[in-house]
Structures are given as structure tokens and as C-alpha cells.
Image: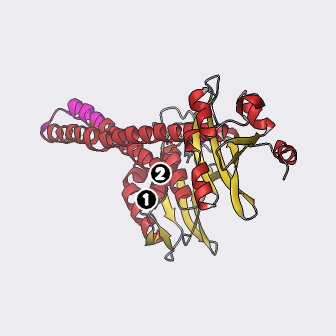
Amino acid sequence: MKIEELKEFIDSIGDMVIVVGRDRRIIAVNEALLKKCSLREEEIVGRECHTISRCLRIPCPAGVACPLQEVLDTGEVRRVIHTHYTKEGRKMVVEITASPLREDGEAAGVIEIIRDVTATYSLQESLKASLERFKKTVKIKELFTDILTHDLINVANIVLLQCETILDREKCPDTRDDLKRLKRNVERLVGMIENAARYARLQSIESLEFRQMDLTEVLRSVVSTLEESAREKEIEIEVRVREPRPAMVNPNIESVFYNLISNAIKFSPSGRRVEVDILDEGRHYLITVKDRGPGIPDEEKERIFERFKRVEKGAVKGTGLGLAIVKRIAELHGGKVWVEDNPGGGSIFYVRIPKEQG
Ligand code: ADP
């Protein structure tokens, strides 16, 4: 190929191109290279490629990573990534693909296609930096979760024990009432810490371990732990499902039942009924928790599943984490949760989860 034809050919290529002969002298460069490196043709063509950057301080994009000799020796294509600085000191990351230029079957030189990958590279670098920052944040969060679960809970439990001990020997009715209030508040504090720690832990895991469990059994055991608080408000919890509901779930599924049923009790006025069911939908189960409480306005129906989002409920206290935990657990099971109005008043919370995982 004549040099003019070669030049015309390489000028039509958008990437930078440099053609070097066996004697290491530059035969041709394309317009894209001249433009990107702020060079003139006469500054570079005809010169020994390796000496260019060293002696004339004209940077060669291939630089030290130039695979020229290797390609001449082996006759094989080589690809390298190289960071270099232009005459103006601008950092440029290039990917160089060097292929042998054959004449009568012999490697007469090398044609190097130099692609500017600076933008992709900086994106990768900033992604790497973000990932590092994210990992650090996760570590701090894990540390905080550990402090929550171990240290704070321990102290709160000690206070709880001390309350009980003093309550046992206290005779004065007024002081006993004060102590009972104090005990209830510490219990609430423990509950809040446990919820926050559970939520933080659930957030940082990507997937759960599953095992075969009977959801009806899980539901019954949750109901038995909540019976006392239901009785205090004269609320009857009706478990409609009778049959076993086997599913591949994580034991955390218990928190779904616990949070939904305890909310139904907490937000319902005294004397109302709470109904819980697990419907078989073939490949899924649909857990339903119906109450006759105040209901949830349409504009809040999605928002309440975000953490710390609470609809003002007067004296009813909470952390605003219960439904966020329910949502996270449902999602980790590949399921979903939502709420609808209960016809005739109140709410129905739905959780749909697959029976099998994967
Ligand atoms: P918490 O109960 O600690 O406030 P949740 O995340 O469990 O936090 O609930 C968020 C909000 O959703 C509650 O503050 C309440 O406003 C609303 N909510 C949840 N369950 C019910 C329910 N069964 N009936 C009416 N409102 C509810």
C-alpha cells in the first residue's frame, strides 16, 4: 500500500492511529492523533518513535507501554492500557491495540490503534471510589448495629431488672404505679432498640437463608405472644387459617406477623376484632391482617412502609420502623406488601410471598 493510500485509510478512522516501520521510525499518523495530542505531522513522522517523547518532549500516546517490539518479534496482536499526559499536561488513558503490518508475509511494521478511554476510565475510577466509600459506610453502620444490639440493650435490660427488683419490695401504691410506668417505658426502649437493630441488619444483607417452615405454626406462636396485649384492650385475634401452610422462608418471617398484628391491636379501639388469614394462591401465600381501626388515608398508603414515616395517631407511640421491617422481609422473600381499606372501616394489610425460593 502506498503511503498516501495508507494515510487516507487511517485518516478515516476515528481512533488515533500510528504506523511504525521495522526500523521503529514513524511512517504515518492519522488526523485524530495529531488533533488529540496537539501535534503537527512534521513533528512526529519520520522520527524514531521511542526517542520522540524522551528527546523532543513530545508525548507519544503509546508511551512506555508501547507493544511495538513485542508485535514485531511475535507477529501477534497485543492490547495494553496506558496512562499518558499530553503536551498541555492533560491526563489521557488510552487502550492500544497493536497489530503487525505485513508485507509479503513478513511483519514490516506495526499499526497501533490508540483509543482514548479517559472518560470510561474516570467513570470506573469514580465508581471504585464510591464503592469504597459505601463499604466504609456499611462498616460504620454494622458497628453502630453492634453497639445497639449489645451495649445499649444490655444497659436497658439492667435498668429493667432493677425496676422489677424495686417493684417486688415496694409497698406504696403510688410509687408502684410510677415504677410500673417506668418499667413500661424501658420495655418500649428495648423494643425500639431491637427494632432499629433488626432493621439495620436487614438493610445490609442481600439475601436470606431459607428453610422449610409452617407459616400457620409461626402465626399461632406470634398470636400467643400478643394475646396479653390484645386482652388488655379486649381485642379478639381470630386466626382463620386451620391447615398447615408450608413454605421456604427465613425465621425473620415471624416479624411480618408480629408487626402487622401488633399494629392492628395498637391502632384499633378497644373491643374490636382482628382477623388473620393465610390464603393459598397456588405458587404464593397471601397473608391478610384485617382490623377495624381508624384506617389509613389513601395518600399515606405507600408512605407508611418507609422507615420513620408515621401518620399522627395521637397517644399511640411507635418508632415508624415496623412496616419498613415488614416490607424489607417481604422483599427479601421475593414478595410484596400493601394496604387497602377494609370495607366497613379499618385496614387490611396484605403480604404476598412465594412458597418456594428461586
Ligand atoms: P409505628 O407503629 O412504630 O409507628 P409502623 O412502621 O409499624 O411504625 O407504622 C407506621 C405508621 O403506619 C403508624 O405510625 C401508623 O400511622 C400507620 N399504621 C400502621 N398500622 C396501622 C393500622 N393497623 N391501622 C392504622 N394505621 C396504621
Q: Secondary structure at mark 1?
A: loop
Residue marked by disc 2: 259
In the image, is the residue at mark 2 within 8 Å of ligand 1 by its beta carbon?
yes
Choose top left, top right, bottom left or bottom right for residue 301: top right
The reply to whether dot 1 and dot 2 touch (C-beta < 8 Å) is: no
Residue 121 lies, in percent from the top left, at 61, 40
Quarter of the rendering occupied by the C terminus:
bottom right
Question: 237 or 60: which is nearer to us?
Answer: 60
Residue 220 as seen in the image, left or right of residue 337: left
On screen, residue 102 above or below 285:
above
Residue marked by disc 1: 252
On screen, residue 257 above or below 23:
below
Residue 306 lies, in percent from the top left, at 57, 41
Mark 2 Cα within 10 Å, few/some/many (few <14, many 20+)?
some
Is 51 covered by the magenta stretch?
A: no
Residue lying farthest left? 169
At 51% from the left and 63% from the top, the residue drawn is 238
Q: Earlier in the sequence, mark 1 or mark 2?
A: 1
Whether residue 350 is visible, yes or no, is no
Question: 16 or 75: which is nearer to us?
Answer: 75
At 45% from the left and 36% from the top, the residue drawn is 317
Magenta segment, prevailing SS (helix, strand or loop): helix
Residue 281 lies, in percent from the top left, at 64, 72
Amino acid under disc 2: Asn
Q: Secondary structure at mark 2?
A: helix
Residue 183 as seen in the image, left or right of residue 94: left
Residue lying farthest top? 88
Magenta region: which residues?
Answer: 169-182
Amino acid under disc 1: Asn
The quadrant of the rendered image in which ligand 1 is seen is top right
Residue 334 lies, in percent from the top left, at 58, 61
